């Protein structure tokens, strides 16, 4: 995982107070904030001019304050696949969130503003997304699940395997999953191996099975 001082960030947030606050907080923690803008058009322009490592994107921005930010994030994901996307919003927009994740969960995060209580946790999530990892708020996962049509293969998972897969979808490491479920890392590894087998995800040189399993879990 990269160090914060090696990570270049662009912020898209329509609230001037929150935008300036994010700039200050991230700068103090060693991130290089390249630009901070208040609308989706400006976001896409600054990323096109000089792609950052990660973009922090609000959902509701001018002109309609509905879903401009999330739709912009989807376009950035398509046009600049190397740029990590961390959606940071008060809302869960399941339709476009699923579309954002459909291209691969690596380098994607979705956190809810009112559920981030620790700045250090936010910074850690930003580093993880910039490094190609995943950071999904549990509430986002829950709502995406509610909007999903799971494949038949998921019905073969045990309740414990579903718990493990849900925590994988949140971007948790094996160690963090073990701590959350109060089991050993070895037990978590066995559960994950079972999940891969039941979802018919074989090891290859190009596919990341952990990401593929999460996508299957969030499949719509």
Image (tube, rainbow, N blue to C red):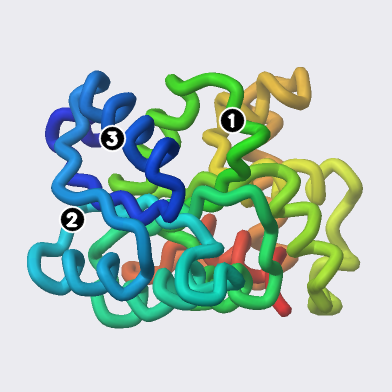
Q: Which of the 4 image quarters holds residue 42?
A: bottom left
In 3D space, how far apart are the residues under numbered discs 2 and 3 (Cα atoms)? 15 Å
Q: For the point 38% across and 39% down, which residue is it?
A: 126
At which x and y percent is residue 186? 63, 28
Circle 1 residue: 116
Q: Which of marks 3 and 1 is in front?
A: 3
Q: Which residue is drawn at 32% across and 36% down?
A: 20
**Residue depicted at x 18% and y 55%:** 52
Q: Give the foreground label among 2 and 3.
A: 3
Q: Name the residue under label 2.
A: 52
Locate residue 10, reporting x and y percent. 25, 51
Compare marks 3 and 1 and give the one earlier in the sequence.
3
Residue assigned mark 3:
23
Mark 1 lies on a secondary structure that is: loop
Q: Judging from the image, what secondary structure is the residue with disc 2 in? A: loop
Circles 3 and 1: CB atoms closer than 8 Å: no
The percent coordinates of residue 89 (x first, y second) are 57, 50
Query: Does residue 107 appear anywhere in the picture?
Result: no
SS class, disc 3: helix
Left or right, residue 50 beside residue 213: left
**Alpha carbon of mark 3 to alpha carbon of mark 1: how far?**
16 Å
Q: Is residue 72 visible?
A: yes
Residue depicted at x 68% and y 76%: 95
Which one is earlier in the sequence, the residue at label 2 or at label 1?
Answer: 2
Q: How many marks?
A: 3
Crowd band around label 2 with a 10 angstrom C-alpha radius: few (<14), some (14–19), many (20+): many
The quadrant of the rendering that contains the C terminus is bottom right
- Image position of 49 (left or right of 129): left
């Amino acid at each position: 995982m990269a160090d914060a001082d090696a990570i270049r960030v662009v912020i898209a947030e329509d609230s001037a107070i929150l935008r300036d606050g994010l700039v200050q907080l991230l700068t103090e923690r060693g991130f290089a904030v390249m630009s901070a803008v208040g609308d989706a058009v400006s976001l896409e322009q600054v990323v096109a001019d000089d792609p950052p490592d990660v973009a922090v994107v609000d959902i509701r921005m001018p002109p309609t304050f509905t879903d401009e930010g999330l739709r912009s994030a989807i376009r950035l994901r398509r046009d600049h696949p190397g740029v990590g996307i961390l959606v940071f919003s008060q809302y869960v927009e399941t339709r476009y969130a699923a579309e954002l994740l459909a291209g691969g969960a690596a380098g994607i995060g979705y956190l809810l503003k009112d559920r981030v209580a620790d700045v250090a946790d936010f910074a850690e999530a930003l580093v993880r997304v910039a490094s190609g990892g995943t950071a999904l708020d549990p509430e986002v996962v829950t709502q995406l699940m509610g909007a999903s049509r799971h494949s038949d293969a998921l019905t073969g998972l045990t309740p414990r395997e579903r718990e493990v897969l849900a925590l994988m979808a949140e971007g948790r490491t094996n160690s963090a999953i073990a701590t959350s479920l109060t089991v050993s890392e070895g037990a978590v590894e066995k559960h994950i191996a079972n999940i891969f087998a039941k979802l018919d995800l074989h090891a290859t040189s190009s596919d990341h099975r952990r990401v593929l399993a999460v996508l299957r879990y969030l499949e719509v």
